[in-house]
Image (cartoon, rainbow, N blue to C red):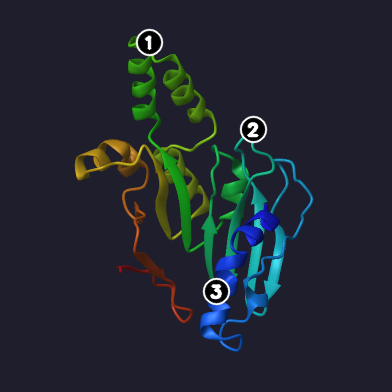
Amino acid sequence: MVSGFNEAYALDSSYRTAHNGSSFMPLARSIMTPQVIEEPIYGDGPETVLELGDLKITAFPVRHDPVRPAYGYRFDYLGRSVVISGDTARTPTLVDAAKGADLLVHEAEANHIVAKVAEVAAQVGRRRVARIMNDIQDYLTSATQAAEAANRAEVGLLVLTHLAPPPPSKLAEDIFTRGVGEIRPEAWLFGSDGMLITLPATSNTIEVDEL
C-alpha cells in the first residue's frame, strides 16, 4: 500500500521539487517508508512504532473485522497526548491505550439511524442496502459507546469524527448524538473541516478554534 502511494504521488513530488528547488523541497522527504509491525491479537497492548526526540507514537489493535490488522494510534509529546481511534467497533484495547489522554478523536456511527434506514430499505425491497446498513453496525462504534469509552479512559476532550451517516443540520446532530449528553454531559464535540485543536505544552488547557 505504501509503495502504491509512493508511485501515485511520484510525479506530483517531482513537480514540487522542480518548482521550489531541492534545498527547500528535497525529493527524498516525499518518499514514505513502510514499517512492518507484528500483527497483534485484540488483547495485546500498544506497541511503540516511532520515538523521535520528545515524540512517541504507539499503535494499538482495534476491532474492524474483516479488516485485520486494524490500528488506532496514540501520540505523546511534551506531556500532552492525542489518541485517534481509527475505524473500530467497541473494544477495551482502545480504552486502555487512551488512559489519561488529553484528546480522543473517535469515529462514531448513529446506529439507531442506520437501523431505521435498514428497516425502511428492507420494506421497499432494497435488500442490498438493507444488508449493508445492518452489516456496518457490527464494526463501527456508536456515539454513546464512544462517550462511554472516553469516560472510562478519563480523557480531557472527546471529538467525534468519521460520522455515519453525516448529520446535515443541527437537528440531525441532536438526533445523531441522542443519549451522549446523559453519558458525558460536557467535554465532547463534533469534529469538522477546519477545526484546529491546540494542546499547549506548558499547561493543561485545550484550545479549539475554527480556521
Q: Is residue 160 above or below residue 208?
A: above
Q: Residue at x 77, y 56 (%)?
A: 36
Q: Quadrant of residue 83?
A: bottom right
Tell me where residue 133 appears, x and y as whole percent: 44, 25
| Residue type at tag 2 | Pro
Name, please, the residue furthest toward the bottom.
23
Q: Residue at x 61, y 39 (%)?
A: 63
Distance from the alpha carbon under mark 2 to that under mark 1: 27 Å
Q: Quadrant of residue 10?
A: bottom right
Q: Is residue 123 above or below residue 78?
A: above
Number of other residues with Cα within 10 Å of mark 1, as a class: few under 14, some 14 to 19, many 20 or more: few
Residue under label 1, please give it.
125
Q: Is residue 122 above or below residue 160?
A: above
The residue nearer to you, when weighing 47 against 28, is 28
Q: Residue 103 has which mark?
A: none
Residue under label 2, please give it.
66
| Residue type at tag 1 | Gly
Lateral position of residue 56 relative to residue 140, left or right: right
| Residue type at tag 3 | Tyr
Number of other residues with Cα within 10 Å of mark 2, as a class: few under 14, some 14 to 19, many 20 or more: few
Residue under label 3, please give it.
15
Which secondary structure lies at badge 1?
Answer: loop
Distance from the alpha carbon under mark 3 to that under mark 2: 38 Å
**In the rendered structure, which disc, 3 or 1, sits on the residue that comes first in sequence?**
3
Lateral position of residue 89 relative to residue 107, left or right: right
Tell me where residue 211 appears, x and y as whole percent: 30, 69
Q: Residue at x 38, y 28 (%)?
A: 114
Q: Residue at x 56, y 80 (%)?
A: 18
